[in-house]
Amino acid sequence: MRILFVGDVVGQPGRKALAEQLPKLRSQYRFNICVVNAENAAGGIGLTRKVAEELFALGADVLTMGNHVWDKKEIFDFIDTEERIVRPLNYPGPCPGRGCGAFPVPGTSAMLGVVNLSGRVFSPTHFDCPFRAAEQAVEELQDCHGILIDIHGEATSEKMALGWYLDGRVSAVVGTHTHVQTADNRVLPGGTAFISDVGMTGPLDSVIGIRKELVLERFLTQRPVKFELAKGRTCLSAVLIEVNMETRLAHSIERILLK
């Protein structure tokens, strides 16, 4: 099974990059299933029904989310019924939507388990423990032919620790949120593919997707500045993960960065 995971799609520029590059990637890599982090896909924060439908039409099979999952309030109207969207599992208490699920892999009889978690380090939200939530999800998805975990968090250490914690029990642990692709992709000794952060799909000449002039103004003046998405050139950040469906473990993880 070949899984393409696309890092944080940022607004319209990110969706444009996905539309341009995904057909090429499908032809080149012949992946079986495409998982896309979409928590920034609508205007740079959150997700709307219209944007979700656009991403599915472009070829995404599953959408994962993150700390901006509730920023577009209309998501409350459809996240319970759109099973292809997975929000952070470790929100405390009752919460709309679901944090993990088993998804059919197109063209095969296989099922891929997808889990979304949020890290707690440097987070303003008081999430439940992602490690214990992961244990719950892995148990629930035991019958799947592979398990992919998107850990959406700020701290490299926390994401790396989760990779080691789950090594040999899941197919892949991939980090999202920082919008900067890391160069530490590897298959851990137990057979779990890992990368600290897949990176961003969106404006290339920017500061993590935002107009660089506005970010510089905030840093230089320490005054509030309204952020806007950058325009111009785009990039697509992704990883390709190859999984043995009998063992559920990874053969390889390859970084992809297209500009």
Image (tube, rainbow, N blue to C red):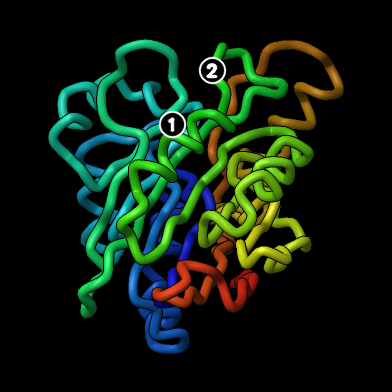
Q: Is residue 214 left or right of residue 256?
A: right
Query: Which image quadrant: the C terminus?
Result: bottom right
3D distance between C-alphas at marks 1 and 2: 9 Å
Task: From the top left corner, tell me how far across and down residue 216 is, in percent.
Answer: 79, 31
Residue picked out by circle 1? 88
Q: Which mark is residue 164?
A: none
Which is more toward the observer, 73 or 83? 83
At x 50% / y 27%, what residue is drawn?
Answer: 67
Q: Which percent across, then down, holds residue 139?
A: 40, 42
Q: Residue at x 66, y 63 (%)?
A: 190
- Tell me: residue 54, above or below residue 86: below
Q: Nearer the viewer, residue 29 or 185?
A: 185
Which corner quadrant of the image does residue 70 belong to? top left
Q: Tell me which label, 1 or 2, sits earlier in the chain.
A: 1
Q: Disc 2 on helix, strand or loop?
A: loop
Are the residues flagged by discs 1 and 2 in contact, CB closer than 8 Å? yes
Quadrant housing the N terminus = bottom left
Q: Amino acid at mark 2?
A: Phe
Residue 89 image offset from top left, x and y in percent: 41, 30
Which residue is identified by label 2? 127
Instruction: Name the residue located 62 percent from the left edge and 13 percent from the top edge.
Output: 124
Assign a secondary structure to mark 1.
loop
Q: 10 Å neighbourhood of mark 2: few (<14), some, or many (≥20)?
A: some
Q: Amino acid at mark 1?
A: Pro
Q: Residue furthest left?
A: 81
Up/down of 192 relative to 224, above or below? below
Percent position (x, y) of residue 234? Answer: 56, 61
The answer to whether residue 26 is above or below residue 9 is below
Say left or right for 49 vs 178: left
Is residue 223 among what the camera can see? yes
